[in-house]
Amino acid sequence: MTSYSSETTGQAAVEMSEACDKDDRFRFASDGLYVEERGSSRCSNETAGPTAQGAWKAVSAFDSLTVSGVAGDGLVLRNKWQVIELSEARLTLSWQITLSSGAVRTTTVKLEKE
C-alpha cells in the first residue's frame, strides 16, 4: 500500500497508513478472489491474521470496484470504491460519506504494483 488517507471538508487530509502497512500486498485475481497479505512489518493494532480473503467485482468498465467479505475478516478495503486511476502500475480508489454535520469525508487508497 502506498497511501491510505482521509480528508473531511474544511480540514487537512490525514494519512492513515503507518510504516507497518507499507509492505502489505493486495491481490485482485481474475476469478474475483481478493487477498490481502500482511507483510513482515506488523502493526500493533492489527487483529487479523497474515492473510485475509474476500471477493471483488468491478462495475461499468472499472468505474467502480466493490470488495466484499464478512464481518471481522480484517479486510482493509471492504467497501464500494470509485476507481480514480487504473493503470498497469497503479490503482487509486476513493469513497465518500456525508457526515451528520453535512461535511463530506473522502477516503483515498493508492496501491502500486511491485
Image: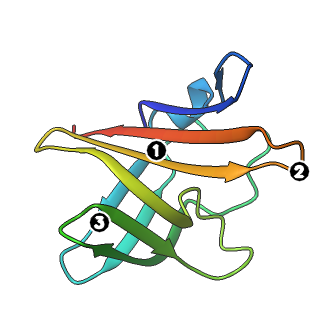
Q: Find residue 8 and report its horizontal and vertical position in percent.
A: 71, 31
Question: Which of the two residues, 92 or 22, is positioned nearer the viewer here?
Answer: 92
Q: Is residue 49 above or below residue 73?
A: above
Residue type for callout 3:
Phe
Whether 13 is drawn above or below 86: the answer is: above
Discs 1/3, front: 3
Q: Residue 100, which numbered label?
A: 2
Q: Is residue 95 something one can see in this rendering? A: yes
The residue where tag 1 is placed is: 24
Mark 2 is surrounded, within 10 Å at the Cα level, by few (under 14), some (14 to 19) or many (20 or more) other residues, namely: few
Relative horizontal placement of residue 24, taking residue 106 as reference (left or right): left
Dot 3: what SS?
A: strand
| Quadrant including the N terminus | top left
Point 28% across, 61% down: residue: 63
Q: Is residue 43 visible?
A: no
Q: Secondary structure at mark 2?
A: loop
Where, quadrant-wise, is the C terminus in this rendering?
Answer: top left
Asked if the residue at tag 2 contacts the one at tag 3, i.e. Cβ–Cβ closer than 8 Å, the answer is no
- The residue that disc 3 covers is 28
Q: Secondary structure at mark 1?
A: loop
Q: Residue at x 68, y 62 (%)?
A: 48
Coordinates of residue 88 in the picture (x, y in percent): 10, 44
